[in-house]
C-alpha cells in the first residue's frame, strides 16, 4: 500500500479565529471555505479546519476524543525563519508553548499552539532539504 496522507483535519471552535491564525500567521491561502470548513492546499495533501460540532456530527461521535498528544510541524529553510514565523503566529492569535532553542539532536525549533491548542513545531533542520515545491526530504 502506498504511504500517504491525503487530508489532515483539525477541529476548531471558531472558524474565523482559526482562519486568521493560518492566513495571517503562516500566510497560507484557502482553496475552499464556506464558513464551516476551510481547506488549504499543502505540498501533497490538504489541511482542513472544520467547525468542531460539524466534524463531530460527521463522525457520528458525541464528542471528539483525545487519542494522544501530537504535533504538526512546519519546517523552514533558514534558522532565522523559526523566530520570525513564531512571532507572526503569536501576532495572529497563537500562543508560544516553547520558545525556540536548539535541541540536543541539532537544528532549531519552537512550539506554538493555534487558537484551538493544536501544537505546531516550527523547525529548521540542517539535515533535511526542502525543495522549491515545499517537499521535505529526510537527509540531504
Image (cartoon, rainbow, N blue to C red):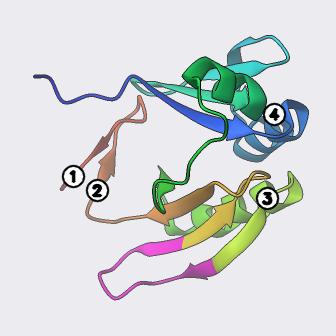
- Which residue is depicted at the point 47% across and 75% down? 108
Question: At numbered mark 1, what does the secondary structure look like: helix, strand or loop?
Answer: loop
Mark 3 touches mark 1? (CB < 8 Å): no
Is residue 95 visible from the viewing direction of this image? yes
| Mark before the other along the chain sequence, 3 or 1 | 3
Q: Earlier in the sequence, mark 3 or mark 4?
A: 4
Name the residue carrying label 2. Answer: 128
Q: Label 3, label 4: how many angstroms apart (C-alpha)?
A: 12 Å
Q: Answer yes or no: do the residues labelled 3 and 4 have beta carbons within 8 Å? A: no
Residue named by callout 4: 19
Which residue ends up furthest to the front in the rendered image?
62
What residue is rendered at 60% in x and 31% in y? Answer: 61
Using the rendered view, name the quadrant where residue 38 is placed.
top right
- How many labels were placed on the picture? 4
105 versus 129 height, above or below: below
- Label 4, label 1: how far apart the Cα atoms are: 30 Å
Q: Is residue 1 above or below residue 98?
A: above
Residue depicted at x 67% and y 64%? 112
Nearest the viewer among 8 and 32 is 8
Question: Could you say which quadrant of the image residue 21 lies in?
Answer: top right
Q: Which dot, 4 or 1, sits closer to the camera?
A: 4
Asked whether 120 or 130 is in front, the reply is 120
Comes first in the chain, label 4 or label 1: 4
Q: Which residue is mark 1?
A: 138
**Region rendered in magenta:** 99-109
Image height of 37 relative to 112, above or below:
above
- Report the Cα–Cα distance between label 4 and label 2: 29 Å
* For marks 1 and 2 on the same chain, the one whose residue lies earlier in the sequence: 2
Amino acid at each position: 500500500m502506498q504511504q500517504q496522507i491525503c487530508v489532515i483535519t483539525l477541529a476548531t471552535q471558531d472558524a474565523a479565529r482559526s482562519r486568521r491564525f493560518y492566513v495571517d500567521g503562516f500566510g497560507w491561502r484557502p482553496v475552499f471555505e464556506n464558513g464551516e470548513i476551510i481547506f488549504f492546499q499543502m505540498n501533497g495533501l490538504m489541511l482542513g479546519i472544520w467547525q468542531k460540532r460539524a466534524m463531530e456530527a460527521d463522525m457520528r461521535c458525541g464528542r471528539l476524543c483525545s487519542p494522544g498528544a501530537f504535533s504538526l510541524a512546519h519546517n523552514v529553510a533558514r534558522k532565522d525563519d523559526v523566530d520570525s514565523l513564531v512571532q507572526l503566529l503569536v501576532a495572529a492569535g497563537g500562543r508560544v508553548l516553547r520558545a525556540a532553542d536548539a535541541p540536543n539532536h541539532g537544528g532549531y525549533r519552537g512550539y506554538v499552539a493555534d487558537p484551538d491548542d493544536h501544537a505546531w513545531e516550527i523547525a529548521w533542520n540542517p539535515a533535511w532539504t526542502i525543495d522549491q515545491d515545499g517537499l521535505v526530504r529526510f537527509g540531504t
